[in-house]
Image (spheres, rainbow, N blue to C red):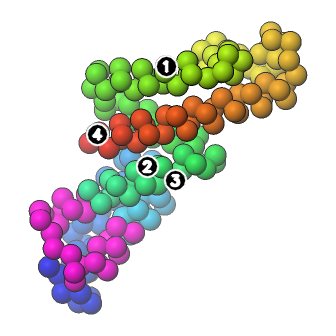
Amino acid sequence: MVQANHAGAFEEIFKRHWEPLYLFALQRLKDQDEAKDTVQDVLISYWLKAKTHTLTGTLEAYLFSSVRYEILHKISKAIKKEEKLTHYTTTVLPDFLNTLDPLEQKELLAAIDREVASLPDRLREIYLLSKEENLSIKEIATRLNLSEQTVKNQLSTALKKLRIGLKEAFIIMLITIS
């Protein structure tokens, strides 16, 4: 247990652990500010609990686990926010997927397939034309004799349904990695 309010102890913990924790977070988040915030939040949280918290393992293991869970928390929150979703799905998710073993990849792809199959027919059709055939909204609208706005709305609805359905599977996969 660390003596709370001992500035020298906190400074030493910060010096020893900040950089490796930051690099760990940066490697996963691909965003310097997010990585810095994550490590800062974890170190401050640890320091605030240090007086009453007893570690069962090493401080280093505790801090790395805390950073990992903070990253998962940020990803979970970001999934709910449209502006961050693109960053996580295009930058973070591919790297995490590359670390999955073939069985885990197969399980995740099966979960995606199940969610796509559960979409109503029209939503599924529009989603598949967009994602598998790489058709633009205009091309889909022409092919299905729909307005472009209808296609945008249907595609947005399909993505929201998939995001909700896959959120839990995605988070479970992230937890099992690393």
Is the C-beta separation of discs 1 and 3 under 8 Å? no
Magenta span has 58?
yes
In percent of width and height, residue 86 lies at 58, 40
Indicate the amino acid at tag 3.
Answer: Lys
Q: Nearer the viewer, mark 2 or mark 3?
A: 3
Near mark 3 (Cα within 10 A), the count class, few <14, some 14-19 or many ≥20, is few
* Sequence order check, earlier mark of 2 and 3: 2
The stretch of residues the image draws in magenta is 41-64
Q: Nearer the viewer, mark 4 or mark 1?
A: 1
The residue where tag 1 is placed is 113
Residue under the point 31% across and 30% down: 100
The residue where tag 3 is placed is 77
Residue 58 lies in what quarter of the image? bottom left
In the picture, the disc for residue 68 is none
For the residue pair 127 and 43, the one nearer the viewer reads as: 127
Determine whether, in the image, residue 88 is placed left or right of residue 70. Answer: right
The residue where tag 4 is placed is 176
Query: Marks 2/1: CA distance?
Result: 26 Å
Near mark 4 (Cα within 10 A), the count class, few <14, some 14-19 or many ≥20, is few
